[in-house]
Every structure is written in structure tokens, then in C-alpha cells.
Amino acid sequence: MQDIFDLIDEDELVEMLSKAVDIPSINPKGNEKPMCEYVENLLKENNIEYLSVPVEEGRYDIIARIKGSQDNAALVFTGHMDVVPVSEDEMKRWDTPPFTSTIKDGKLYGRGSADMKSGLISAIYSMILLKRHNIIPSRDIILAATIDEENLMKGSKALQDNEAFKNAKYLIVCEPTDMKICNEQKGRTWADICVHGMTAHGSQKGVGENAIYLAIKLIEKIKHTEFKEYPDTFWRTLAINAGVEPQVVPDRCVFTVDARLQVGHEPAKIWEKLEELIQEIKSENPHFDATYEIEDMRTSWHTKKEDELIQGIMSSLKKMEIDPAFDTFTGSTDASMLIKNNLIPVIIGPGDLSVVHRENEYVELRQLFDSCKLYLDLMMNI
């Protein structure tokens, strides 16, 4: 076991991650291509077979494979290549340039360092070590590097029913979990809701039906509605837009409602509740009218601790003298889509979710190295 870990060149791994963080693969609006090309070059340079899966013009996923001693029950590692943008206000709060990797006090700073180029590069580097040293893993190892995870998950959606997963069994999502075992993930769903009113000249008092005021009624009901059977579920308004011109009473107000669902709570139930609230307001105000368009529904999932995959991860961590700890992943990941290929999932990777999507994102180098050891051990022994 120690011999395999000794294959890891920490300086090489850090350099590989640094180059990845230096690539501004921002999404939206889908600028993943330079990162895709970087991943492809790493695979080509190390003679790892791969194919690209077109998603839309100029955007594609990458699937790589190393053959194992058996061709069934393959192990899939997945990571996304896109990162969220840095706003002008956030830029002012960074202590280092967000798209120039900076190493300080045992941490590597930069956008995407934790979410999730460290996990992705760690998995790729683990495959490179196997190939470089002619080590045959216990089963086929598949890498699924996706685009658009930070937006509509077009990448993982494009991989549903892909032949590459025909004989695959397990899915390891290399998202940042602080190296905890996330054997379950919360669900997510969101929608754009349009409340309709009637226009009028802004100078005429009491004329028209202001869509903003009508929308506020629904927003307030949403704000104060809880899901008693699922107390960890919550929803909230995260964006709003209305108005034609400053002197016109608006006849449309569109706002986005985002719901995060407790494990086991079906996304469709959220919109059934919204229908109830709309009907309540209609009974109070016959002029009220609201329509909505669901943007996405991502189901939660749970993998039992007794499963072979979880037991294998626990065993690997103990070999590394890390006490296994469990957690629920509160965000949504590509696992929501990839499990539709009948894969059994788990999320574990370097980085802390609390430092991502914000200024001064970083990953601890210690966790980067630990994740590489973990992935190597799993590739060899699970």
C-alpha cells in the first residue's frame, strides 16, 4: 500500500492543479473549452484513452477509461470543469488574483481551487499514475469530466444512457466535502414565477394593477411557508425583475424561487405547494394571476453505509490514518443526473464547501494529497 502512495509526486500534482486554476473556465456563459483542452492534453500525454461527448456548440464532456482486470462493475470518478464567475464586488474582496493560483500557508488559492478542480485533477492524476507505472486496477476506471455543472447541468444530462456507463456500478463525485463521506445529497428545484397585473399611466392614482405588489403577496406566503414533514427543506426568492418604464405601472413581475430539499422530499411536491398558495391568493383577490416555469428538478439520494462502496472508502481512510466522518451534501451535484445511469453514488473530495463561490477560495494542499491517496487506493482495491 505504501508503495502506491509513494508514486505520488506532490510537486507535480500541485503544478497540475495550479495550471488548471489559472484557466478561467467561467460558467455562465460556458467558457469551459480551454479547460477541456487542458484535460485532453493531460490524457493524451499519458496515453489514456478518451472520447469527447458534444453537448452544444463549442462545449463538450470528456470520458476517459483505464481497463481493469475485470470489465464489469466499473468505478466512475466525476468532476466538473466549469467555475462560477467573479463579480466586480467580489473581485474587490480577493486578497490574490482569483484566476492566478497562489500558494500560501499550505493552501492553494484561486477560483475553482476547491470547487472543484482539485478533486478533478486529483482523480486524473491518480489515473495517470496507474497508466505511467503499468498498474492494472481491479476494475475499469472511468473519468467523466463535465461542463455546465454550475448552471443547468447540461453536461451530465448529456451523459444519460451513454454506452460508457453500460458496465459501471459506482460513482465517486470528487466535490469538496472536507474529505468527509457524503453518502447522501439534498435535492434542489427552482422556477421562474410570473405574476400578472395591468398597466396604467404612473401619474394616475389607483389605476392599473401593480404586478410588483401582487408578487409581494405571493413572495410573503412563500417566505412564511414551512414543510413540516421535511423540516430541513427550505425555499426562498433569489431574484426579481419587473417594470416597463419608470412612468408605467408594471403588468409583469418575474421572480425566481429556489428550493433545497431534505433527503426524500420529492421536487414535484414543492410546486404542488406553490399551486396551493396561488389558489389561496386568488380566493382573496380574483384579479390575481400567476404562472411559473420550472427550470430544473434534481432529486435527492441516499447510499447505505453498509454498501461496498462506502465500506471501501472507510477502509481506505483508515489506512491513511483518517477517521471516517459522514455528512449530507447540501448542494446539488452532477450525481443527480448521473445516477440515472443506475450508478450508486458517494461524494468525497478535497476542499471545504464553506469557502467556495466566494472570495479567497482555497484548497488545503494536505487534502489535495489525501484525496489522491484515497482515489488511488479505491482504484486498486474496491
Image (tube, rainbow, N blue to C red):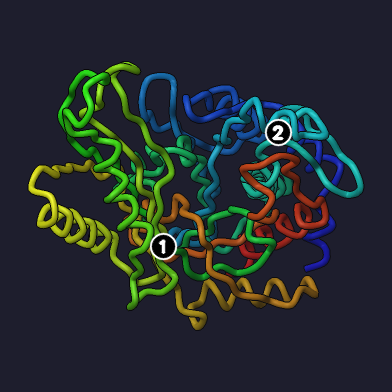
Q: Residue furthest bottom?
A: 306
* Image coordinates for residue 209, horizontal then vertical, percent: 18, 34
Between 212 and 10, the one lying in front of the other is 212
Marker disc for residue 83: none
Task: Tell me which amino acid carries mark 1.
Answer: Phe
Q: In this picture, is 203 found above or below 38?
A: above
Classify 10 Å Cα crowding around label 2: few (below 14), some (14-19), many (20 and above): many
Q: Secondary structure at mark 2?
A: helix
Q: Earlier along the polypeptide chain: callout 2 or callout 1?
A: 2
Classify 10 Å Cα crowding around label 1: few (below 14), some (14-19), many (20 and above): some
Between 187 and 224, the one lying in front of the other is 224
Is the N terminus in the top left, top right, bottom left or bottom right quadrant?
A: bottom right
Residue that mark 2 sits on: 21
Between 203 and 137, the one lying in front of the other is 203
Q: Secondary structure at mark 1?
A: strand
Q: Residue furthest front?
A: 205
Task: Tell me which amino acid carries mark 2.
Answer: Val
* Image coordinates for residue 320, horizontal then vertical, percent: 78, 71
Q: Residue furthest right?
A: 105
The Cα atoms of the two marked residues, 2 and 1, are separated by 33 Å
Q: In this picture, is 262 found above or below 54?
A: below
Residue that mark 1 sits on: 234
Whether tag 2 and tag 1 are in contact, CB under 8 A, the answer is no
Q: Which quarter of the picture shows residue 18?
A: top right
* Image coordinates for residue 10, horizontal then vertical, percent: 84, 47
